[in-house]
Image: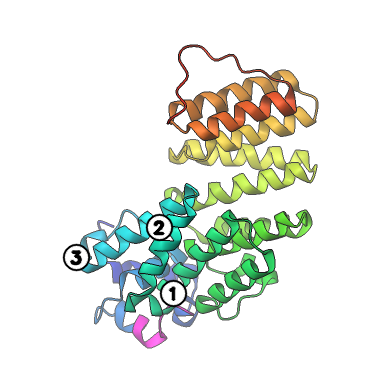
Amino acid sequence: MPYYSVADLVKKLRTQKGMSQEDLADGIMTTSNLSRFESGLQMPQKDKLDAILQRLGVDTQETYNYYLNKRDYEIYKKCDHLKSLIAHNKNSDASILLDELSEFPEFSENIKKQFLMSCKAAIMVNLGENNDKIRKLAIQALLLTVPTYYDKYISEYYLSDQEARLINILAITYYNENNLEKTIKLMDDLKTSIETMRIDEKHKSRIFTVILYNLSKYLGLAKKYKEAIKICDYSKKICIETSNYENLPGIIYNKAYVLYELGYKDVCERLIYIAYDMLEGMERYKERDIVKDYAKDRMGIVIEVKGKQDNGY
């Protein structure tokens, strides 16, 4: 942000989007506090500023970490570690850290409280717990910052990354119940929200490609193959344009699955090898082996591996 203070940028972007202070502040801070912030009279806490900026489409990972104090820095390191533990399915360690963070007084407030609730819901998903209980927790968390939350209005909300992840969790619970119609509807509405509300393409790609990856998978399973291919190609384009390749192997793999179902085995096999090689290069060995095993068992494609195998253990 070379030409604007954070406060000036928030005001400028809010005005460009035609948002009122009430709309932007809703569920995050009071309208009067947002007004004082935009006027340069006070600085909100980092989690609240994160949510405000994310609703406006700004990349909060690269803009203003410099102003954190030591305590905030230590807390956010723990939060990042918690997210990493959940992503790697280390649920026991994640639960211990979640309980530790819940003792901090900061986590009694809406956004940090929502963070812990979203992490708890994600752990429950990893452990295959009751879908109704997961949904109840996820919706309670959403209502902390989106008091008017209702499924049918998802495409109209200005969502933070955390709110988007909670809706993604809701979609997973319906997928677990084989309700693909509901799952796809939630993900498609979430896609619309992120697609239309975000302005920072690099920031958008971080959460957006996760949503598109999941949506393409669900469309493929629902045998909506043409739609799935369209989403895969769209997501690949975003990954390349923003140099964000984290989800690209999965997206390529999803397209390979769809093409196999359509009978294009030769093209499918080429894409399988590309996804496999990308995961190998990223040292994501468990995902690599999942691709290899699924290709053999489901598609009859045997990946011939050259050189020494490294299982990452």
Q: Is residue 12 left or right of residue 165?
A: left
- Where disc 3 sits, the SS reads helix
Disc 1 vs disc 3: Cβ atoms closer than 8 Å? no
Disc 2 vs disc 3: Cβ atoms closer than 8 Å? no
Q: Earlier in the sequence, mark 2 or mark 1?
A: 2
Q: Nearer the viewer, residue 58 or 2?
A: 58
User: Which of the 4 image quadrants contains residue 172?
Assistant: bottom right
Amino acid, disc 2: Leu
x then y, percent, for residue 155: 63, 65
**Pointer 3 residue:** 70
**Pointer 2 residue:** 82
Q: Earlier in the sequence, mark 2 or mark 3?
A: 3
**Badge 3: few (under 14), some or many (20 or more) residues near its Cα, within 10 Å?**
few
- Where disc 1 sits, the SS reads helix
Disc 2 vs disc 1: Cβ atoms closer than 8 Å? no
> What is the C-alpha distance between the residues marked 2 and 3?
18 Å
The part of the chain drawn in magenta is: 27-34
Quadrant into which the N terminus falls? bottom left
Q: Of the residues tagged 2 and 1, which is closer to the observer?
A: 2
Rendering colour mode:
rainbow
**Pointer 1 residue:** 113
**Badge 2: few (under 14), some or many (20 or more) residues near its Cα, within 10 Å?**
many
- From this viewpoint, which residue is outermost toward the left? 70
Q: Tell how many labels.
A: 3
Position of 300 relative to 232 (above/below): above
- From this viewpoint, which residue is outermost toward the bottom? 32
Indicate which disc residue 138 carries: none
x then y, percent, for residue 270: 63, 20
* 71 in magenta: no
